[in-house]
Structures are given as C-alpha cells and as structure tokens.
Image (spheres, grey):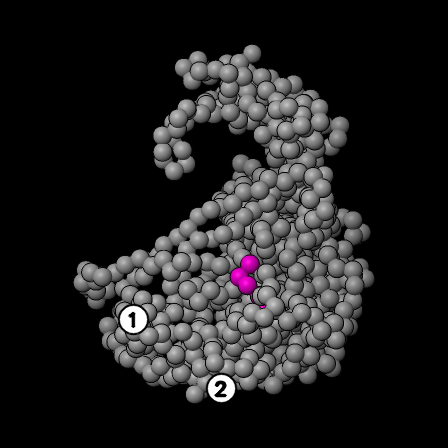
Amino acid sequence: MRKVAIVGAGLTKFVRRALETPKELSFEATKTALDSCGLSLDDIDCVAHGSAPDAFDGIHQKGEYLADGCGGWNKPTMRVYVGGATGVHAVVHGWHHVASGMFDTCLVVCEEKMSNAMPHAQGFFLTIFDAITERALHPNLLWIFALEMNRYMQRYGYTKEDMALAAVNNKKNGLMHPSSQFKDEITVEDVLNSETMAYPVSRLDVSPVSDGAAAVVLAAEPVARRLTDKPVWIEGVGWTLDTAYWATRDLYYPRYLDKAARMAYEMAGIREPDKQINIAEPYDPFDYKALHHMEGLQLSPRGKTVELLRDGHFARDGNLPMCPSGGLLGVGNPIAAAGTMKICELFWQLRGEAGERQVPGDPRLGVAQAWGDLMQVSSVVVTGI
Amino acid sequence: MSEKLKVSGGTALSEEDIRSGKIFVTEDSLNCAYAWDTGVAINRYLAELKQGRIIATECRKCKRVMLPPRLFCELCFIPCNTWRHVKDTGTINTFSICHVHWDASRIKEGEDPHLPAVIEIDGASEGMGIMHILGEVEPEKIKIGMKVQAVWKPETERTGSINDIKYFKPL
Amino acid sequence: MGILEKITRNVDNRYWNPGVGAFPVKNRYTAGVAGQQFFERLKEDSKIFGTRCKTCETTYVPARLYCERCFERLEEKDWVDVGTEGVIHSFTVVHKTLEGEAKEKPDLIAAIQIADGILIHRLGELDDMEAYIGMKVAAQFKAKADRRGGINDIDYFKPL
C-alpha cells in the first residue's frame, strides 16, 4: 500500500437553505479545494464522492447527478453511501483509490442539500426502520437517538446538564468557523430550557438541518511531496458495521466504533490513542454522541468522559481538544458534508492553518469519525503530519 | 492561508425569499407507496403474535434465543430451525418520551406523548430487546430496569402484527 | 439446505401493508445560482441564456455556474443570449400515462439542441407524423402573467 496524503481542502458555508443546487454546492467546495493546492481538474485522476439519502436532495441516482459538480466529468467516479458515516467514509474510499496504486490523485467530495426535503428532512428517515416489526409502531428518527441517549446517561449516572456541556463546548468552537451557520454562544441553561423533543433530547442537544458541501484532495506520496511541504498523511483508516438489529445491541456503548477505531489505530501504529492523539473530531449530531464516541474512539475511559469534559480536558486549549471545528453542533450538519468537514479541520489544524480556531501546541496527530446507517456503522480516519 | 481561500458558496435563503416568489422553486412529491413481504421468519412471528404469543429462534451454535426471530444467526452465519416461545414480560432497557411526529411536527396540546422503549423480553437471550411502546403509565414514572408486560388486543382484533400487542405496561 | 427447504414449505408467506406504506413527503428544489438567473431572464425578457466557457468554447444551455470540463467558474461576462430557436435532436411520441393508461392525445416530447446544450420540452402546433430529427423549432412562451420562473414558462416548442 502506498502512503496517501491530504493536500487540499475546501468548504462551502453551511446554511439552513442554500440558493445553490446540489451540483453547485459541490462545485464550490471542489473548486476551493483544488485552488487551495494549485491543481486543476487535469491533475485529478479519479473522484470518490459521497452523499447521504437520495431522498434529501430529492434526486435519485444522486451519485451521477452530482458527479460533474465534483469534477467527475469523464473520470473514474464512484459514490459511497453509508448514511451519516458517508462524509468520513468517502475519504476512506478515496484513500483506497490512491493507496492501491491505481491512481495518483483523487478528489473526495461530499454534499447534502437537506432543505430540498419537505416538510422536514427527518421525515425522510421513515423507511430506515424495519418495515414490519418497527415501522408499524409509527416510529420517528428521534426515537433511536433518545433511546440511546437515555441508556447512555442511565448507565453512567450522567445528567442532561452533563450532556449539554458538550453542546456548549462544540458550539463555542464553531463560532470561530467561517462555514458555521450559527452566530450566538449558548449556555447549559439554554440547552436545558430548550423545547423537549423526545426526552431526554431537547432542541439544543441536536445539530441543525443544513445545506453544504466539503472536499479534500488526496495524493500519493511522491505527488504530495511535490505539491506541498506540509502534506497531511492518512495514517490509518477503519470501518465496521454492527448488527442491523439495533435494539439487540446494548446502546450505552458504540460497539460499531470500538472495532473501527482499533483498526485505524493499529494501521497508524498507535498504541495509546488517549495519549498520542492531539485532536479529535468525534461525530456529534447530538451532544451525547460526541461523548459516547470519545469513549468508542478509546480517547476517554467509559463513564469518565463527563469528568474529563468538566476538567477542561476536551476544551480547545485542553489536553485533547474535542471538535475544535465546532462539529455538527457548532458548524452545521449537511450530513455527508459534515463528516468531510471534520477531515478538513484535521487538515487545517495539523498544518497550523486553522486561524483563530488553531489548537495550541503544534498538534501532530488527529482523528475524525462519523457514524451512520441505522446507528450501526462507523468510519474512522487518523491523520498525521 | 486566509479563510477566503477555504470557504466559497452556500448562499443563505430565507423562507420569505421563497414565499415572496423572489427565489424560484419547483415542488414535487414522490407519491409512492410500498408493500413488503414479511419473509419466512417474521411471517411466523406475526402468526404467533396473532395467537397472543411471542416466538423466537435459537441458534444451535451460539445458543442465542433471538428476537425478532430470524432464519439465520447473523453472528454464526448458519440457518436457525429451532423455535422457542418466550414470555410476554420483559425489562425496560431504555425509553423516551417523544413530543414530535415522524415529520418533526410537534404533538398537539392535550395529545399524549409517544412512549417508545427497548424492552428485553424474558426468555430471550440477554440484550435481545425489541422496540415497542409503553402504556398505562405516567411518563415521569418510567424507569430503566422496570418490569413490564404486554397488553394484547382482544383476539378478534388481532391481525398478525406487532400492533397485536397494544403496548407494554408496568408489572 | 435448511433455508431452501423452509422457503418451499412456506405457503402462507404474504405481503405486509400495515397502512404505513405511503411515504408522504415532498421535495422543493431551488434553481440554483445560475438557474435563478436563467429563469429570471426567461420569465422577464422571454430570453434563453447560456453560459460560454472560453477555454473549451462550449456554450451550455441552460446556463450553468461552471464548466464541467475545465472546472472553471462561468461569470457574468460569460452569459450569452442564445436566441429562442433550436433544432430537434431527437423526439418521442408518448402514448401512455405514467400509470400505463392510454392517453387521449399523445404527447410529443423532444430533445431540442440550442447552442451546445439540450433542452427537454414539449412540441406543439404540429402532428406527431410531421416531427423529424433536424427540424427547426422555436420557443412558444406562456403569457407573462402565467409565468412562474420555471421551465414551463415556455409552453412548448413549435415548428419555425
């Protein structure tokens, strides 16, 4: 396998409702990523793009539809789709293309336009439940998050206030992100006082519905070294699917992530992730998920995560900054694009280009993760400089 | 690198831009409906529910008694031919009190919140939960670990559906 | 063989439609940065615009934000009025509705080439036997009051 580096990155702003079409959003992120490393489409060998359900954008065969906006015209192009995990998985997918020796460069582009889904994107998840044993109960998407959050809190004696701390941490970081769709800082009280949607989930425990796109450029080692003196290496990748019988897996621990993380760390030669990793971008569509995933990523002992969070361990200037980008809670959640945004953040942070969000102390090693399908899949990418 | 080089596009619109006709939109509806085959294992599960019983399958290798029943064990990847009746009681593994409909619209004033739960059924292997709803309980009194029992529809009203169990109520 | 045996014995296998089979959702699409401007010109000025990439000399119709070949942004200066006439690149005569019922009167649907682009639209004011590939056609716009800023602001294309 060849070494693969990230050499460029680009984003659109994340907004609730974008004027741009899904193709146009993809173009903006892709063009920005290419410009950031001085490449043109002629320099690109292949495209690995990702987008979550077709139903959001309301365009079936979204892979083909998006391809030209992702620089895929007349090139080997392949779409990946693993629900919410798509944004990080697309990078794993692109990594395969280059690591295999088949291609020297690969564009990885993820896009989501959720505002096309009416009346609300949540409704489009209706058919992810088992049609006969679950959907007959008229479930909605929030149920599974609420059930998982409740189980997680009960298991370790965490409170809603504890969970809200993660929302406050991420939203605060996100205020400094140029793509963020938020302008205001929030407090723990704001989260606790926000509307209860599905106990224990309140309005501000949840990331927003967003439109946006994100892109990175991958290159094989010799090409990467020619292009930049600061390539960000993909040191490890991992992904796993757990059982689709989601109610039969105890929800307090993300088993699907445990294995994916260990796979990525082994490849990266990391033995003590909690000591060696300098920045973490766990997937945070809900505040509790950021903490839940820190445990699955082996970055925090099970049941001790809130304590560490309260001690400032995961703050931007702490020992192990959590979601310095702001994450999905702080920047926005255009599903697939949000995962790739996390990879963009690692790229900028490790190169020291994150502006006012820059994590102090020259971070060398970062991990990004996303989670999807019916709660059962996770993808992990470890990057280093 | 300046932030300008990192972010481009993502022009924010408001609902008013669209309502006023300033921004053109096209609306379309999928207008589709589905019907699903129950499959082999779930067919029997539903037939048993109609009789007022819950049935599971057992894997001869890992010995898991699985709910919902399945034709193959996804861990051992072998067929399952052994059927076992399990009880209609269980333990709440987790629950929610939901104020939101499937399309994110809010429940109306006076409408009861939905009470979904994962219930570990007695007689199935540990951790073998099914999703169902709770009833005959004050939402604030629900606790994880609470023992519950199925409340069945009258026999004549059962159709061979997961809804033949109306809900689970505290024991 | 266990699984196969079971399937052959399974005579009461049935389908399930518990009344939740419908997926009552809809989509709402914006026309996008280029599309918004394209439809504004169509609606207000009865004009069809394309965008021309000067690098590869392709003129896209409808106008686009970017050239998919060169991956260059197409700017204000790249917008060109391509007229309202085109040539039938191909066409089809549709006799059935979406549900498979016979249509009272067949629809004539054509791919109409304008500059380097193709517009899919209806043909009007001609019999299906008269249409041919290569035929020159022109856009018939709806009355201004009926235009909504969409592709249906053109009622149909008719022979020149």
**Residue A256 in the image: above or below residue A84:** below
Residue B19, given in percent of the width and then of the height, sits at 69, 44
The secondary element bearing badge 1 is classed as: helix
Please report whichever mark, 1 or 2, sits nearer to the chain's N-terminal start: 2
Residue A119, given in percent of the width and then of the height, sits at 58, 53
The segment highlighted magenta reads B99-103
Q: In this rendering, does residue A142 appear at all?
A: yes
**Residue A10 in the image: above or below residue B140:** above
Residue B144, given in percent of the width and then of the height, sits at 52, 84
* Amino acid type, residue under disc 1 in the picture: Thr
Query: Mark 2 belongs to which subunit?
Result: B
- The residue beneath circle 2 is B145
User: What predominant SS class does the magenta segment belong to?
Assistant: loop
Is residue A13 on the magenta stretch?
A: no
Instruction: Name the residue nearer the viewer: B67 or B43.
Output: B43
At a point 60% along the width and 39% down the height, the residue shown is B26
The secondary element bearing badge 2 is classed as: loop
**Residue C157 in the image: above or below residue B15:** above
- The residue beneath circle 1 is B156
Q: Residues within 10 Å of mark 2 (few under 14, many from 20)?
A: few
Whether labels 1 and 2 share one chain: yes
* Amino acid type, residue under disc 2 in the picture: Gly
